[in-house]
Image (cartoon, rainbow, N blue to C red):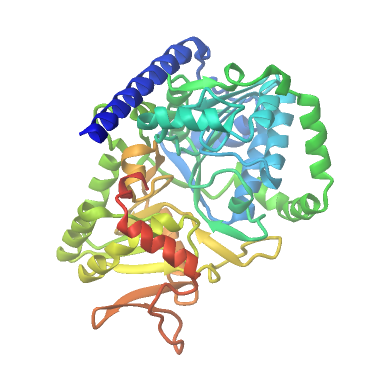
Amino acid sequence: MRVAKFVLIGLVMFALASWVTVYVYGRFAVQARGAPSQALPVAENVTDLDRAVAAQTAEHPDMSGLRLVSDNIEAFAVRAHVARATGRSLDLQYYYWRDDLTGALLGREILAAADRGVRVRLLLDDINSRDGDDVYSAYDSHPNIEIRLFNPAMSRDSALRRGLEMILRAVTVTRRMHNKAFIGDGRVAIVGGRNVGDAYFGASDTANFRDLDVAMVGPAVDETAAIFDRFWNSPVVLPIRSLSDPEHRSLAKLRTRLEDMVASEPAQLYLSRLDSLAGAAAARAAEPPFHWTPDVDVVSDPPEKVFDVGQQSWLNQTIDPAINSATGNVEITSPYFIPGDEGVSMLRRLVARGVQVSVLTNSLAATDVAAVHGAYAPYRKSLLDSGVGLFELRAEGAPGRISLFGSSNASLHTKAFTVDDRTGFIGSFNFDPRSISLNTEMGVLFSDPQLTAEVRREFATHIGPSHSYRLVLEDGTLTWKGEAGVAPEYNEPGASYWRRFVATLIGFLPVESQL
């Protein structure tokens, strides 16, 4: 009885402390909010991007031009070229922006744009920014650059205080902004799965991600800009200058460090490769072979999802009807795939209707989040029993040029699906509980046979036996099959014992809703 009394008192005290923390945070956030701002209006013939894009969009009124960006090196080059061609604005929204080689090189491009008078708004999720306040604050000290953080912690300098704040704000602190968008002059938008960092642009010497973006012009850019503005002006977004110490804002030191990095051997190797692609990259960024279609929707969860009120699966409510409309085939690529019982039932119903359903995800050896794999693994047999084709990317078998620095290992990071031969989606949305209920996500939902065919070719390449395992059930035993003539595997091929242990342990814990 005494123990129960102490537990009750502890719970009451924790609840009170949590309420006080949330209340204090709310009062602080109201006072710290930045002034509202909106996307700058486009012009017809002012910037390089205006001149490059306006003629094309004029030939395709009320249509958006879309182009797939699959190669990692090109993904960097397109962003760098857009930054160099802007003359008015850069609006950038990312889950994280690493201060590594490619993050610094892109940061240098953004700083150069700001020096030309371009207005730069950079919106980042806070969960991965805690070690980068000095760098972000230095960028923010430029008169033409403003950085804001989504759902940030008040405590910045003490890991202990920050951890305590996260515990006391546990209900909302797990809700993150996972959106990715790169918008130049209101003319070009790049939306997809890539964050900013070496692993996304072929510059990691350990393992690199396979990912997809869509570069867009036309009305789809306006939709992307409207989503950015809604987040930028949200009450859950605060300027970094209201959170950081002014002494940390050294723009001069940042410039020196960026120039030193550019002069380094790795940067010169990377930039020399970019130079060899410069002409092609510039042409593809400014005048690429777009697929023109009126059937494009840039869709996103709203920032209010962080408050855990009302509808909780905005984007999922858009995605599910598209998938359920299938009559021939559905192909899903998701690096973190946790379908849940409801997802398995949906796919089972599709197969029962005669739809061919295939899913590509990471193997345990390839994934960068072993815990997620542990939550996915228990659904494999149910999926296979339902007739779903299931493929897992091999860590050492991803196609294409992976890294400029010697790494041939890869991890799947693409979030995409296609329906029949007409509809596709590319974005940040994973088929897992976190994307559905906790994170804000965004993506491009389109109807275009040619672009859909491109995405399907990417899928077909990646599920090939030299790049992925095909999972089957042999006498009820889960079996991984690869290339012809190679013996099948029966226990998480290529994964270390430690990874297997972590994944198995997670499978028994009640944490699926947080993954």
Q: Nearer the viewer, residue 471 or 218?
A: 471
Residue drawn 40% across and 61% down?
Answer: 503
Quadrant of the drawing holding the N terminus: top left
Q: Position of residue 173 (x, y in %)?
A: 42, 31
Residue drawn 45% across and 90% down?
Answer: 485
The outermost residue toward the top is: 31
Q: Nearer the viewer, residue 481 or 307?
A: 307
Q: Nearer the viewer, residue 62 or 295?
A: 295
Q: Nearer the viewer, residue 67 or 4?
A: 4
Number of labels in the image equals 0
Residue drawn 35% across and 31% down?
Answer: 171
Query: In this picture, is 434 found above or below 394?
Result: above
Query: In this picture, is 161 found above or below 412?
Result: above
The outermost residue toward the front is: 2
For residue 143, say whether it is visible.
no
The answer to which image quadrant residue 326 occupies is: bottom left
For residue 434, say whether it is visible.
yes
Q: Position of residue 432 (x, y in %)?
A: 34, 49
Query: In this picture, is 217 found above or below 400?
Result: above
Residue drawn 55% across and 63% down?
Answer: 410
The answer to which image quadrant residue 186 occupies is: top right
Query: In this picture, is 319 found above or below 211?
Result: above
Q: Position of residue 242 (x, y in %)?
A: 58, 16
Q: Position of residue 200 (x, y in %)?
A: 58, 51
The outermost residue toward the bottom is: 485
Relative placement, left or right, of 185 versus 501 is right
